[in-house]
Image: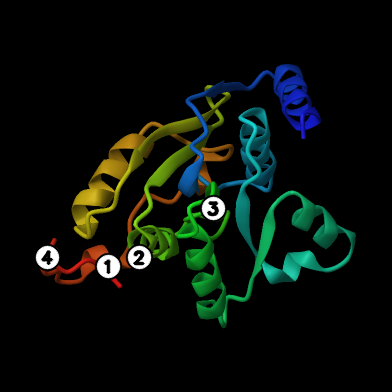
Amino acid sequence: MIIRPAIARALLRVTRWKVVGEVPAVGVAVGAPHTSYWDWVTMLMIMWRGGRKPRVLIKKELFHGPLGWLLTVTGGVPVDREQPSALIRVLMKQAKSGEDFLLVIAAEGTRSKGEYWKPGFYRIARAARMPIALGFVDGPTRTMGFGPSLVPTGDVRADMDVIRAFYADKHGVHPDRRTEPRLPEEDKPQRPADPTHPPR
């Protein structure tokens, strides 16, 4: 819809937020740091400004009542955290269809400070052979947008080192709630990735 980019530009101008980078057409987009309810709104504005309608994974409990309708029409996809496998299979099928597909995931999984990021974004991107697009919100500079995209190699620590370097100066709306980009897999012994045997 032509009206969405116009709405997004107007809201961003009024709120004095600066947008940098280009919205990718395809990929698994990480939205971080996730420290506020407003992160969903800001990421939606970035997407609308770039003419994209993303799919955003949101816990199913938020889809009750009028809010559920709003989340659905703006690209929200309900997630049952106790049974995520069926949804992941559907998303991977869509990702491999060849059409524009941009899945947005708040990798921290919570607005509170935690120990690890959730690994779902990495696993989906790796299995679907899609790039990870690094989206961000930085409150102190009132800047948001997208940085580079990363094609996951299977070397989790090396890939996360790249992601950590990008987010090192990104603080979110509430910097004290920021979770350092780190996956649980990084604290486990790893075998070198075998390029002759890509993930199934």
Q: Classify 180 as above or below 6.
A: below
- Graded by Cα atoms within 10 Å as few (under 14), some (14 to 19) or many (20 or more), the crowding at tag 1 reads few
Tell me which amino acid carries mark 2: Ala
Q: Which residue is mark 2?
A: 127
Residue 49, how many percent across, how many down? 66, 28
Q: Secondary structure at mark 2?
A: helix
Q: Where residue 50 appears, x then y in whole percent?
A: 61, 30
Q: Is residue 117 left or right of residue 9?
A: left
The part of the image, by quadrant, that contains residue 1 is: top right
In the rendered image, residue 196, in percent from the top left (x then y), is placed at 12, 65
Pick out the residue farthest to the bottom. 83
The residue tagged 4 is: 194
Which residue was labeled with disc 1?
185
Question: With respect to residue 102, does 78 lie above or below?
Answer: below
Mark 2 or mark 3: whose residue is earlier in sequence: 3
Q: Position of residue 162 (x, y in %)?
A: 26, 42
Quadrant of res 5:
top right
Secondary-structure class at tag 1? helix
Q: Earlier in the sequence, mark 4 or mark 3?
A: 3
Task: Measure the alpha-carbon separation of dots 1 and 3.
Answer: 22 Å
| Mark pair 4, 1: CA separation | 17 Å
Q: Is residue 138 above or below residue 72?
A: above
Location of mark 3 (residue): 103
Which one is in front in this view, the residue at disc 1 or the one at disc 3? 3
Q: Residues within 10 Å of mark 2 (few under 14, many from 20)?
A: some
Question: Which residue appears at 28% of the width and 37% of the height?
Answer: 165
Please report the residue visible at 25 percent of the width from the left and 50 percent of the height from the top. Answer: 159
Disc 3 marks which amino acid?
A: Leu
